[in-house]
Each structure stands twice: as structure tokens, then as C-alpha cells.
Image (cartoon, helix red, strand yellow):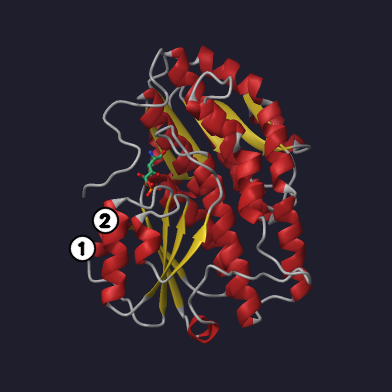
Amino acid sequence: EKGGFWSFMAKEIADQPKAVADTLLGRTNESGDLILDDARIDEATLRTIDKIIVVACGTAAYAGHVAKYAIEHWCRIPVEIELAHEFRYRDPIVTPRTLVVAISQSGETMDTLMAVRHAQEQGAKVIAIVNTHGSTIPRESDAVLYTHAGPEVAVASTKAFVSQITAAYILGLYFAQLRGNMFRDEIHTVLDELRAMPDKIQEVLDRGERVREIARWMADTSSVLFLGRHVGFPIALEGALKLKELAYIHAEGFAAGELKHGPIALIEPGQPVFVIVPSPRGRDSLHSKVISNIQEIRARGARTLVIAEDGDEAVTPFADEVFWVPQCPTLLSPLVTVVPLQIFAAELSRAKGLDVDQPRNLAKSVTVE
Ligand code: M6R
């Protein structure tokens, strides 16, 4: 069932173009407008929503973190991301006008399920973004938007992650359509851009050999840092999580802007640091700030492994290695920038002779609190 791949994870990484394409399928009518049949919450109720809280754990929470940037930008609704296990045990401000979005691959994560119940007790509506049909979280939620990633077997989440981002974006655009925050044409343009992403993900996969080579050279590394800004920040967190869980290497992700507030003290000669560089075609100050961050850590001896957009020559003087990704709109870039980080973690784990599909101490779905 691994389809000729050396591991389920390798297969699932390769499945990502299809996972995103399938998650986008069947969401629009003949006029190109979004129709969310599964969303059983009536439109009048949805129009009253004044806050969204995403509850999730691990990689699913990072998908929510990415979606926050897009949904707030498109819909002008505040979006909070809350780890499900933290949400439950504080006193969150939840009202009938709050929409809770529960994101879960398995649909069985106990922490997330408990957060769903906690939200409903306080009168909030819950939409689940889930991959596994018939699982508990969608059954207990008011509405569901299924990701169509297909079964994910490897413990490390990959294709579910890109599908979760895609589904959350569909939800965000649906809101924008419903509330009139965006022009129809703008929504259709973003949908077209989303439909172009599977081919771009495929391009990154086709360039994977260089990432694998570097991962093999780094098999005895004991610490790796990841830096990103804006949507690159949750991708830095995700890259670090993948490396911890698969290769048992100490890894930490930071918002690049935090460097000078502490983490730069960690930089010593030879320290590998991945940096996710935002598109130079996006907000200009963002790009140049990250380039300065690369210069700062390079000056202190860091080995910089940079993920940058094709044609971004500004990065080359300061990068020990560049992993190029195709050009795409900033908000959609996580769908491509995460891929080299997944490949890196999987290959490093393999180079260390570890079980990439079943890392120690972990279960695919965490059904206990
Ligand atoms: O099934 P879920 O999406 O609810 O699982 C949430 C986390 O347990 C999961 O994403 C975990 O962090 C993965 N092992 C990450 O690769």
C-alpha cells in the first residue's frame, strides 16, 4: 500500500498535490460561487459571527495558525488559535456569536473533542475541518468541511496539513462571500490561485533530491532552528515539529522578528537555521526584514538553509543553501514552503535509521487527554 515508496510518509508527501486538488473539488456552483453543502449552520447565524476560535492540536493547530492570516485579511473577523487542551481549562470568552473551528485529521483527538463540547456548552456553533469520515468530532459538530486527503497512515501529518489549510481557506472565502467582504471577482481569483497550487507543490516535490542530499549530510546534527515571518512563522513551527517527532533532534521554530528579543543568543558557528523567506512581490518590508535576519545570523556563523521563491536573487549572497519554490501569492505560499521541511525531516530520520512512519512514543491519533 506504500505504492512503491520507501515509507507511508514519503507516499503521503508525494500525495499532496492530489490532496489539495481533491479538497478543492466540488465547492463551487456553475457561476463559480462557493457552496458549502456540508455546512449545516444556516447563513443567518453565520452572518452574526463576530469571532472565530480555532481549536486543534499539533500540526492541525499550525494549519489554523496559517489560516488566521488569510481569514482575518479576507473577512475582517478576529481569529484566535487555541490549543484545544488549553482552551478547555481556561475561561475562554465564547458566546453564541463565536464560531469555533475544530481542525483534526483523525476526528478522534480527545483534547479537540473536549474543546468542541466545551464550546457548545457555551452556546457556540462548531464547524469541524476533519479528514476521517464518520469520526467523532464531525458527528458532534454543527457542521463539517471534510478535507479529502485520503487516509493518512504515517504518524507525522503531511497531506492532512496542506488539506486543512486548503479547507480553512475555503471556509474563509465562503465567509467573505457571505458577508460581502470581498468582491466576487476577487474570491474567484483566489480560488483560481488555489487551484494552481497542486502543480506548484508538484514542482517542489520534483526538486526534492537536493533537500534529501542535505538531510543526509546533516544526519548527526543535534539542533536545528527555523525562522519565519507572517505565514512563514507557523511553517517554521511545523518544520521544527516534524524534525522533533521524526528525527528526535532538538528543533525550535521562531517568528523571525523575535530573534533580537532572545533567540539570537543561540546562534553560534555552525548552527543550522532554516529561514522561510516571504515573497519579494508581497509586502516589501517583510521580505527585506527577513533578508536582514539572515544577514544577522550569518554574521554570527549560522549555516543558513533558505526557502525562497524562484527568482529572489536577494537571498543568494547570504544563503549556504537555497531551496527554491515556485512563485505564488503570499497567503498561499505555506502550501509550497512546508514541503522541503517535510522532506528534510523524513530523510534525516531515514538517514538515522529510524522508523519514520512510527516514531517512538507517539500514536497516530491521541484518544486520551
Ligand atoms: O488527528 P489530529 O489532526 O487531531 O491530530 C493532532 C495532532 O496530534 C497531530 O497533528 C500531531 O501533532 C502529528 N503527529 C504531527 O505530525
| In the depicted structure, whether residue 296 falls above or below residue 92 | above
Q: Can you give x and y, in whole percent of width and height, for residue 195 in the image? A: 72, 52
Q: How many marks?
A: 2
The three-letter amino acid code for the residue at tag 1 is Tyr
Residue at the image position 54 percent from the left and 26 percent from the top: 10
Q: Is residue 284 left or right of residue 297?
A: right
Mark 1 in CB contact with mark 2 (< 8 angstroms) = yes
For the residue pair 81 and 236, the one nearer the viewer reads as: 81
Circle 1 is placed at which residue position? 89
The answer to whether mark 1 is within 8 Å of ligand 1 is: no
Residue 157's x, y, as percent?
45, 39
Left or right of residue 162, residue 188 in this image: right
Q: Which quadrant contains ligand 1? A: top left
* Residue drawn at (34%, 26%) of the image: 359
Q: Quadrant of residue 27?
A: bottom right
Residue at disc 1, secondary structure = helix
- Callout 2 crowding tier (Cα within 10 Å): few <14, some 14–19, many ≥20: some
> Alpha-carbon distance for marks 1 and 2?
7 Å
Do we see residue 298 in this rendering? no
The residue positioned 32% from the left and 50% from the top of the image is 109
Q: Which residue is label 2 attached to?
A: 85
